[in-house]
Image (cartoon, helix red, strand yellow):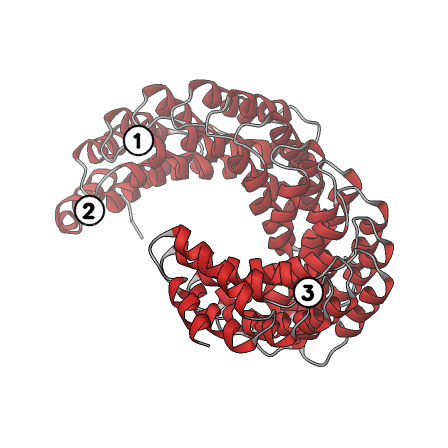
Amino acid sequence: AHAVASCIRLLYHGDLDVRNAAIKGLSHVVERGHEETIREVSKALEQEDASIRETGVQAFLVLAERGNHQVTDQLCSCLEHPEADTRNAAIRILSQVVEQGDEHAIAAAARRLEHESGDVRKAALKCLMRIAPVGDRNAVDAVMSRLRHASADVRESALKGLAKVVIRSEERTFASVRQLAEHPSWEVREAATKALGSIVVRGDEHGIRAAGAMLEDPVAAVRLAAANVFSQVTSPGDALALAVVKCRLEHRDTEVRKAATRALTKVAERGDAAAIGAVGSCLEHEDIKVRQHVNRALKVIGGLDDPTVLEAVTQRLEHGRAEVRSTALWTLERLATRNNRSAIDAVCMRLEHSESDTRLAAIRGLHRVATKSNDYALDQISVRLEHQSPLTRVAALEALAQMSRKGDVHSFQRVAERVGDEELAVRKVAARKLGQVGARGDEFAIRSVGNLLDHSDKEVRAAAVNALPDVAEKGDWEAIDQISRRLGSSKPGIRKSATRGLLQVTEPGDRRALEACTRHLESARDLEVRQDAARALRQLGSPGDDKVMIPLARSWANLQIK
């Protein structure tokens, strides 16, 4: 006993040769497997000095009896040591003194998978990999049983361990996981679903179908795990996986369809037209969350500017429900880079649609796919100004005004040409849009809009009146001059439009406007012209001017103004 104590004490000596001699001495004075000596030697594994720990490892290897359970338990307890070096030393010794597949050692290491410390669980996994051959039933069962554990960290450790100890697609293991997938606890079902990725080879039919079934789980976390596991159990483009996922896109449950949409991004090859079509159809879903998730799925499957994706999205601009069209616009903005010609063409094509809602959606969609004044977009819109359908020409005018910068000469001319359109609805919109595209204060724009006050159509004149403030500042001399000339027109509708126009471009009491009215009051021979001029004076004058101007007008024209 004295000799043993002396040798153990020398294991901590500063000289390596002395420590080696102590190990050799121990081998002569004690038998292998001597528990008390091994217990004392194991303390060396806990030393801070790495060289002392190494001496402890060597002494352990000399003294430990292979297959001795007490030795195994002693070493496994070291897996719980707070120092990583001590844990690693224990793993190293275990791998040499334990037979591969030793049931007792596997059970002892597996118990540490339940430890509260992540480092200990990690050490236990590492140990299992060393002492359990792949496919060892004891190791697989021990790890599988931890998938039922109440702690998420323990289940996560078990999942990592399972990947290391199973033979993929082994029937018994798969059956055990499928059984866990029906467990009452959703946490266990989630763990079982994640385990599928570790226990089957890619393309395994049973694994793919099992993942598909879990997409229908009532708990969101399980469905999410099922969607994500498809990337492990299959390869992009796998026909079976695509079929399994696509059939869930038609499921009655909204949440299942959402999960299937996510799963489709894992199984579809980039650019897969059938997959894009299947996902695109979900843009019509009544649940906005499903529709929004489609955007992400299409981005993964098709990517930005993919023609098939763009067509799938723009088709929904024709949908009868406003929320679907709105989602399509939102998606289009995110999947098409600005000024992409395919996207512009697809949207402009909808300007020709027979349904007003679709045309309106196309007008709104243009600014999402093209920048203002983009030449290609303006050219494509302008082509529709000549379309045989007046509805399309109106939509094109709306779109052109929206996409043109204010003061764009070419756009102004294109809109002005439509003022002479054969259809009143087109002429009216063209008159209104002149103000939107014309530069404010531009004499040509003011004259062009002012000339429309002479138009034979009442609605065109009204649209021109409304457009005047867009091209003329309040008090603009050119605008006042252009409009006031119409006060002397022989047509009452034009005179009324002129009065309304003056009200749009002048402040109350504007001197030039009042002088223009007075001139017509003094010089006009037509009684109705003088009456309208007097009415215009009253409307244009400031309230305080009534005492002067109204009596003046009455005495000059001998009129009765109502």
How far is the residue under mark 3 from the one under mark 1?
62 Å
| Residue at x-position 66% and y-position 36% | 310
Nearer to us in this view, 33 or 105: 33
Mark 2 neighbour class, 10 Å CA radius: few under 14, some 14 to 19, many 20 or more: some
Q: Is residue 488 left or right of residue 205?
A: left
User: Does 396 sit above or below residue 155?
Assistant: above
The amino acid beneath tag 1 is Ala
| SS label for mark 3 | helix
Give the number of the disc on residue 550.
2
Residue 461 x/y as whole percent: 46, 35
Q: Residue at x 70, y 72 (%)?
A: 142
Seen in the image, is 120 located left or right of residue 212?
left
Which residue position holds label 3?
Answer: 223
Between 137 and 465, the residue placed more toward the observer is 137
Sequence-first disc among 2 and 1: 1
Residue 315 image offset from top left, x and y in percent: 71, 42
* 441 versus 461 height, above or below: above
From mark 2 to mark 1, how far is it between C-alphas? 29 Å
Observer able to see residue 305: yes
State the image coordinates of residue 48 (x, y, percent, origin top left). Answer: 36, 60
Amino acid type, label 2:
Ile
Q: Above or below — where is 554 with respect to 218?
A: above
- Residue 286 seen in this snapshot: no
Residue 207, percent from left and from top: 81, 58
Task: Indicate left or right for 423 with 28 as reference.
Answer: right
| Residue in view at x 64 percent, y 23 percent | 386
Residue at the disc numbered 1: 472
| Disc 1 crowd, CA 10 A, few/some/many (<14, 14-19, 20+) | many
Disc 2/disc 3 C-alpha distance (Å): 81 Å
Q: Under tag 2, what secondary structure?
A: helix
